[in-house]
Image (cartoon, rainbow, N blue to C red):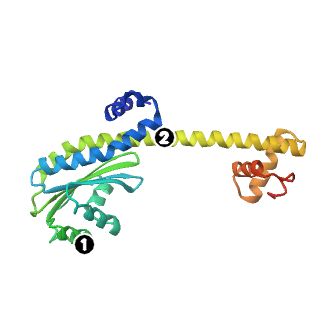
Amino acid sequence: MSRRARTRLEAATSSPSAAHDLDGLLSAAEASAPRSLNQLVADAARQVPACSGAAVAFWRDGEPAALAASHPSLPALIEAEVTSGRGPALEALRTSQPVGCPDTLAEGRWPEYCAAALRQGVRCSLCLAYRSGGAALCLSLFSARPRTLGPQAIAAAERLAASGMALVGLTSEYGDARREQLQLRDAAQSRAQVDQAKGVLMHALHCSADQALEQMRQISQARNMKVADVAARIITSRKADVLEGLR
């Protein structure tokens, strides 16, 4: 764990002692996400010039994992994009560049999004996306007037999104660490199962450890099963002819 990552995580959590527990740290970071996102959209709606409302989506592995909006009608616009598979937010996520919709009445690229936006009185929008590993943050700004979210809005939104990006990087970094931890744990459990199954076979067949392992490998190839799965079947079987039951 890097010093920078630990510092960022300790700043984002309320319990300093949690910094010594990987699972606890990740849970705390993920739990803080809704609060951070709500604050981000509230600040955007207040501080970005010409912005009437804002929504932010936290994406993980290509799916929206958390969403916050300054008005309850705005999530419908994100939903329209996800359902149709196209829209300014998805385009910003794809290109990592600001994507604007100057006037929803004149926009032809995203008809489903524009229809949803017009139903909510949105005439102009601007989306900015930021990625870190398998996570991403997309901030969408909305205005009731056409052609009002320009360069000034981009500059203000980028300043606000810096705090959101810290959360994206935090959860992505510790998500990777958690996945690695789970993979190592699973590998250790598999090795333990194989060793236990070898003991069962050595006792049942009066063979060596190498011979027992070779028996499991042969069954694995013949049945198209993982050796760990073969081992689990041997361990749970109460029959004396454990191998016959698997052949």
Give whichever of 77, 85 is nearer the camera. 77
Q: Is residue 83 above or below residue 245?
A: below
The quarter of the rendered structure image containing the C terminus is bottom right
Residue drawn at point x = 75 percent, y = 50 percent: 236
Front tag of 1 and 2 = 2
Q: Mark 1 vs mark 2: which is more N-terminal?
A: 1
Residue drawn at point x = 25 percent, y = 61 percent: 88
Q: Position of residue 187 (x, y in %)?
A: 63, 41
| Residue of label 1 | 111
**Which amino acid type is marked by label 1?**
Pro
Circles 1 and 2 in contact, beta carbons < 8 Å:
no
Residue 58 disc label = none
Local SS, label 1: helix
**Which amino acid type is marked by label 2?**
Arg
The quarter of the rendered structure image containing the N terminus is top left
Residue 231 placement, left or right of 116: right
Residue drawn at point x = 82 percent, y = 39 percent: 209
Local SS, label 2: helix
Residue 178 disc label = 2
> How far separated are the C-alphas under marks 1 and 2?
40 Å
Q: Position of residue 4 (x, y in %)?
A: 36, 29
Residue 132 placement, left or right of 187: left
Q: Is residue 118 above or below residue 26?
A: below
